[in-house]
Image (cartoon, rainbow, N blue to C red):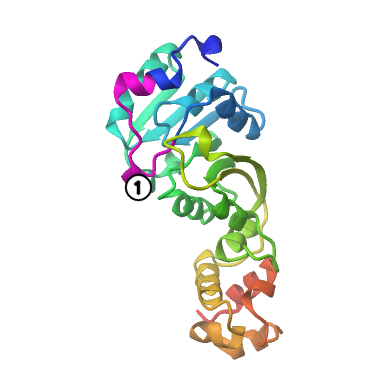
Amino acid sequence: MAAIDGLPPLGDVIKQFGLDAKKSLGQNFLLDLNLTQKIARAAGQLEGTTVVEVGPGPGGLTRALLANGVRKVIAIERDQRCLPALAAIADHYPGRLEVLEGDALETDFSQLADCPIKIIANLPYNIGTQLLVNWLLSSPWPPYYESLTLMFQKEVAQRIVAQPGESHYGRLGVLAGWRAQATMAFDVSPQAFTPPPKVTSSVVHLTPRSAPYDCNPDRLTQITKAAFGQRRKMLRQSLKSVGGEALLTRCEIDPRRRAETLSIDEFCLLAKAMQP
């Protein structure tokens, strides 16, 4: 990759700018530029697209995106120490990299570009799940993004793609399956990062569904939180706070079932039948 873009190896960049990864920011930097290329390619066609990246750090994935023909990368970085390294990339790709200093959790992603975007990121572990939920619950729908290509801890990735009846199936799987088609792309070894995390990571690709089941996102969130908060109990008990047996009866769902046996459509049906 360095031979492609003429920029220094990432290890040298980290040393030059003193970018030791901070645990408090959920940082684990990817140094393998072949791997960042693989993440970029997992997002599909990139030529001429606009990409939003969260937590670029020293810019390994940023460089891969730009080298793969992305028209513009909008990178959101909270760590001020990374800004000079990103500025060097911006100078190398004039007009194609915009760096926004700030907190991704407080960013209105829908206002970042006047065209559909792809969101591609090695997400900081400490905010990755909340960011995904925010994107999945976007309003209006279909959303402002064409796809999400994101790296998580493998356990979180398994929860995102889990199907009813599987051990990892839970609230995150319902929300992801409701509004998107989610697939696991590939795993990433801890040794690919600096510092190496204690767990394997996985890249997940999500494509929004154009017409998901029509139900209220807030009520679906409430239903799934109640159901999986007491997943070992029967639904008539776990859903008592949101309608319990009466709600289940209205939806013709056996109150003796447990949360992990319900399909996504059944959860949506319950959310739609909840009393206002």
Residue holding disc 1: 106
Q: Amino acid at mark 1?
A: Glu
Look at the picture and state if 91 lies above or below 119.
above
Q: Residue at x 48, y 53 (%)?
A: 129
Question: x and y percent of residue 185 in the render?
Answer: 66, 41
Count up the numbered dots: 1
Side of 174 relative to 230 (left or right): right
Question: x and y percent of residue 195 in the render?
Answer: 42, 36
Q: Nearer the viewer, residue 93 or 82?
A: 82
Helix, strand or loop at label 1? It is helix
Q: Residue at x 46, y 49 (%)?
A: 128
Question: x and y percent of residue 37 in the render?
Answer: 59, 26
Question: x and y percent of residue 210 in the render?
Answer: 67, 50
Whether the magenta-drawn stretch holds residue 140 is answered as no
Q: Which residues are magenta?
A: 13-28
Q: Nearer the viewer, residue 23 or 237?
A: 23
Side of 230 relative to 166 (left or right): left
Q: Residue at x 45, y 12 (%)?
A: 7
Q: Quadrant of residue 4?
A: top right
Look at the picture and state if 270 lies above or below 143.
below
Q: Which quadrant holds the N terminus? A: top right
